[in-house]
Image (cartoon, rainbow, N blue to C red):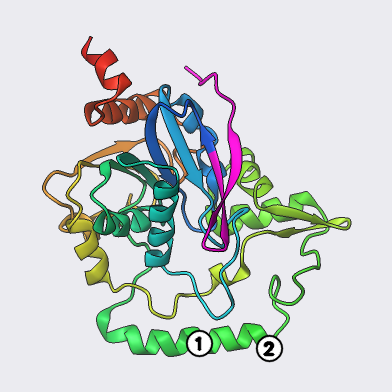
Amino acid sequence: MRSQFSPKDHLLDLDGIEIAVRSWGPEDGIPVLALHGWLDNAASFERLAPLLDGCFVVAPDLVGHGRSDHRRHDSGYYLWEHAEDMLAVVDSLGLGQFHVLAHGMGSGVATLLAALTSGIASMILLDGMGAPFTVAEDERVQHLAKAYRLKRLVRRSRLQGFSDKDGSQFDNLEDALLQRRSRLDGGLSAEAARLLAMRDLLQVGEGYCWRHDPRLVLPEPMPLTEREACDLLSQVSCPLYLMLGRQGAFAGDGFARREAALPRQAKVSWHPGGHHLHLEGPDRALVDQILRVLARHEQGTLQRLVNE
């Protein structure tokens, strides 16, 4: 059943950085913090959130993404900074206990958030198994040097998105949608890509440009190592559910690489669809499973209704 509540948009000012938030459902519903993936935004949950009846779904645009502010040029985009931002978001909203619904890169933010707070009642990872971008421990120095060389290169060049912040990158909407589909997920439908793009596009004259910070496409100078990513995943102590796409990022050997890091309480299920299975018209089985998980670990209204 689709929620009768229309989505709401508002801005949160957190120490001078504005974070754009889209929410669905009644504010006294089960609190769910929804974390999107790399280069996505809150619209990632545009089709799933209205189906989570009885839930108050809060989906921020991570800093640098969508309609949120960018970080200063002497700063970067690290998962632990996103996690601190999200902790500030839930604190500002007064959410003492909340559930986490995270997709892709958002699942890496979620595992870090779990290390910062005991307020997570349950965690659901949608086609995610923690930090997606890692390096081997013996490659960290080389990666750091390469990342800074690339950073200097784009500053000196006129690569798209870095040259003129007030200039248009695309002559028409279709060109922007084509880039979004090719960059994020080759199997993403035009309709799903449009939902993500429309929250991330700004009209400039007769053309368009992305709102997100172009630095997001650059590698992090100091990303987590694979061992650190696995350690963060293994230390998640709250109820943990992985709902993965049969044609998603872990359909091959990706799952095996992280399987040993899953904590004992983790439960894994596979669903039709690719990496954006929650956006490409989520099937009823996925929605029902999410609702069962939230009801099982929530002491609020929905828990009482289920028990009755």
On screen, residue 129 above or below 59? below
The region drawn magenta spans 1-22
The residue shown at (34%, 24%) is 288
Please, what secondary structure does the residue beneath circle 2 have? helix
- The location of residue 301, given as percent across then percent down, is 31, 20
The residue shown at (25%, 58%) is 115
- What is the quadrant of the C terminus in the image? top left
Q: Is residue 207 visible?
A: yes
Q: Of the residues shown, which amino acid type is indicated by label 1?
A: Tyr
Per the model, the C-alpha gap separating discs 1 and 2 is 13 Å
Find residue 234 and report its image quarter. bottom left
Nearer to us in this view, 42 or 10: 10
Q: Is residue 242 visible?
A: no
Residue 148's disc number: 1
Q: Of the residues shown, which amino acid type is indicated by label 2?
A: Arg
Between disc 1 and disc 2, whose residue precedes? 1
The residue labelled by disc 2 is 156
